Amino acid sequence: DTAVSQTPKYLVTQMGNDKSIKCEQNLGHDTMYWYKQDSKKFLKIMFSYNNKELIINETVPNRFSPKSPDKAHLNLHINSLELGDSAVYFCASSVDRGADTQYFGPGTRLTVL
Amino acid sequence: RKEVEQDPGPFNVPEGATVAFNCTYSNSASQSFFWYRQDCRKEPKLLMSVYSSGNEDGRFTAQLNRASQYISLLIRDSKLSDSATYLCVVNTFPASGGSYIPTFGRGTSLIVHP
């Protein structure tokens, strides 16, 4: 009965490859987020969707493309991976787009070689 | 000036000590504030929201000072299990409209030793 789940947990890949990370929440929340936490532990928001609509799109390279097939899922596709993309990617959800508590998934540790 | 700033620490304290962290924010229009806890190699989890009047949850007390633009977290009677990184989060509604944007501080590391 995991609230926010992500797959895979670990991802090791070569530079230039394309990869996807999946996120699902079973909390019935309307809003979902993607964050990147770099090696210095700085957690930065990348995207947010509210009921399948993109509502936050921070300064992220075009190589990153989120997709929300329904409000319970938010996937992240990354094209042409670069060394600097190595980080932990966290998915999160909240009740709605307001200033609510966020519930985080366990994270996906991406290593680009 | 960074949007949300925290002293990274580490704060190294003995069990039973009282320790306090501050977090400053730069946008006076920020609306809501939280403290999250993150254990090593784990996801952040909500510790407590921060209300204007201040609020307490057991050994933890959070305060908001809008005039000086900072929030604080006080931990009394520290336990070994309190060792973690404490992240402050500030939600701001942009002037251009849209949605609240959460901004995390870099976190303050706490180590409680026997």
Image (cartoon, rainbow, N blue to C red):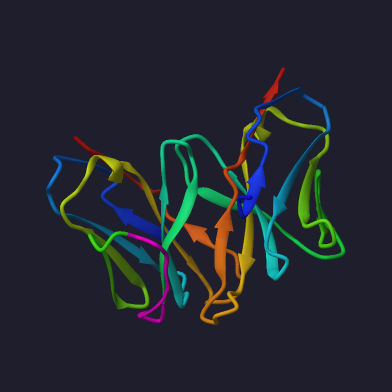
Is B57 placed left or right of B11 in the picture?
Answer: right
Q: In the rendered image, which quarter is residue B91 located in?
A: bottom right
Outermost residue to the front: B1
Q: Which of these two is toward me, B18 or B72?
A: B72
Q: Is residue A1 visible?
A: no
Question: In the image, is residue B42 above or below residue B31?
Answer: above
Residue drawn 14% across the image and 54% down it: A18
Q: x, y (%) of residue B109?
A: 62, 33
Q: Is residue B109 visible?
A: yes
- Find the magenta span and give its range: A50-60
Is B84 placed left or right of A64 in the picture?
Answer: right
Question: In the image, is residue B42 above or below residue A99?
Answer: above
Question: In the image, is residue B7 above or below residue A99?
Answer: above
Q: Residue A52 magenta-drawn?
A: yes
Outermost residue to the right: B53
Residue drawn 17% across the image and 57% down it: A79
Q: Residue B55 magenta-drawn?
A: no
